[in-house]
Image: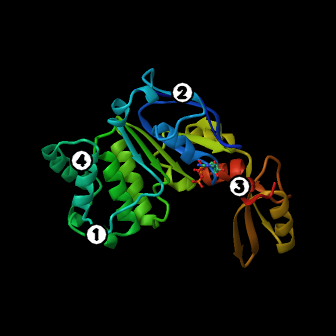
Amino acid sequence: MRLTIENISKEFKDKKAVTRFSAELTEGVYALLGPNGAGKTTLMRMLADILKPSSGRILLNGKDISLMGDNYRDILGYLPQEFGLYKNFTAVRFLSYFASLKGLDKKEAVARVEEVLELVNLQKERKRKLGTYSGGMKRRLGIAQALLNDPKILIVDEPTAGLDPQERVRFRNLLSEIAGDRIVLLSTHIVSDIEYIAKEVLLMRQGELIQRSKIERLLESVKGKVWKGRVGQEELSKLQRSHKVGNIQRGEKGIEVRIVSDEKPMTNAVAVSPTLEDVYLYFFEREVEGVV
Ligand SMILES: Nc1ncnc2c1ncn2[C@@H]1O[C@H](COP(=O)(O)OP(=O)(O)OP(=O)(O)O)[C@@H](O)[C@H]1O
């Protein structure tokens, strides 16, 4: 299976949300990583065939998805960022309702609802009203909904927003488990979400794909650019204005600071092994803070 994104752009009036984005995706988990407003949601909505690109094409095994109609929707699962729930519905009722919308016949739907509840580990909560669900349970239910039609392509937009760390780990494992022979595309700006599960990371900034690689290669690309050292308060303030400063640890011996920089940022700095957070900082952080 091959999903080809061919030079797509999307403009809203005078706003360019996505600009000439191209990529080819095969089975596995891909992470779309970028700051707020980078164009992740817009790209995903185009991939879910909810939004038409202003230009360019999206092809599944060589066929334009906009011409595939139900043949595309039948193999697509999409979990949007904002996901409305009916508070008085139970999980079973909610999923049964979506199963009928997706065209599953009644008998098929009953069996499938139980299957997806088991997949996301919500069987015990199947009869509970959704108004009493925690954030994590709601997101898991969202994934269950997206999985009802056993999609070959699964698109999930910031699935871990608002989840506590334990729920995030559980959710991550779930995605990696179901990835198998599907194309899974997940967007996030939380790097720890993707550290263990992404086959490749697509870095997006201001509507453009700026980098696409395996995590190891991304780490490699900032090797020798991550520094640690001790500074005083005054020096720290200066460095914060001139450099990309990561973790700051205050201890009895002073302030230990982590900096991502092409050049050695201070005399006592030593190079340290990069993490994915350093990669994020290297590519984005200054723009997020608007410090440029
Ligand atoms: N319907 C729209 N009309 C006008 N501008 C839009 C519309 N949808 C998105 N945009 C703009 O396009 C840009 C990209 O937005 P998008 O929501 O795709 O980014 P994102 O990376 O998903 O951000 P976030 O992480 O905050 O969800 C933003 O500047 C946004 O304001």
Residue at horizontal 17%, vertical 42%? 105
* Callout 2 touching callout 1 (CB < 8 Å): no
- Residue 202: image quadrant is top right
Q: Residue furthest bottom?
A: 252
Which circle's residue, 4 or 1, is located before the other in the chain? 1
* Callout 2 touching callout 3 (CB < 8 Å): no
- Between 47 and 236, the residue placed more toward the observer is 47
- The amino acid type found where label 1 is placed reads Asn
Kindly report the distance in space between the C-alpha atoms of the residues bearing marks 2 and 3.
31 Å
Which circle's residue, 2 or 1, is located before the other in the chain? 2
Residue topped by disc 4: 100
- In the image, residue 205 sits, relative to residue 131, either above or below, namely above
**In this rendering, which labeled residue sits more in front, label 4 or label 3?**
4
* Callout 4 touching callout 3 (CB < 8 Å): no
At which x and y percent is residue 112?
20, 47
- Between 251 and 239, the residue placed more toward the observer is 239
Asked if ligand 1 lies within 8 A of label 3, the reply is no
Asked if ligand 1 lies within 8 A of label 1, the reply is no
**In this rendering, which labeled residue sits more in front, label 4 or label 2?**
4
Callout 3 crowding tier (Cα within 10 Å): few <14, some 14–19, many ≥20: many
At which x and y percent is residue 37?
64, 51
**Res. 6 in view:** no
The secondary structure type at the circle numbered 1 is loop
Residue topped by disc 3: 285
Residue topped by disc 2: 57
**Res. 161 in view:** yes
Which circle's residue, 4 or 2, is located before the other in the chain? 2
- The amino acid type found where label 2 is placed reads Arg
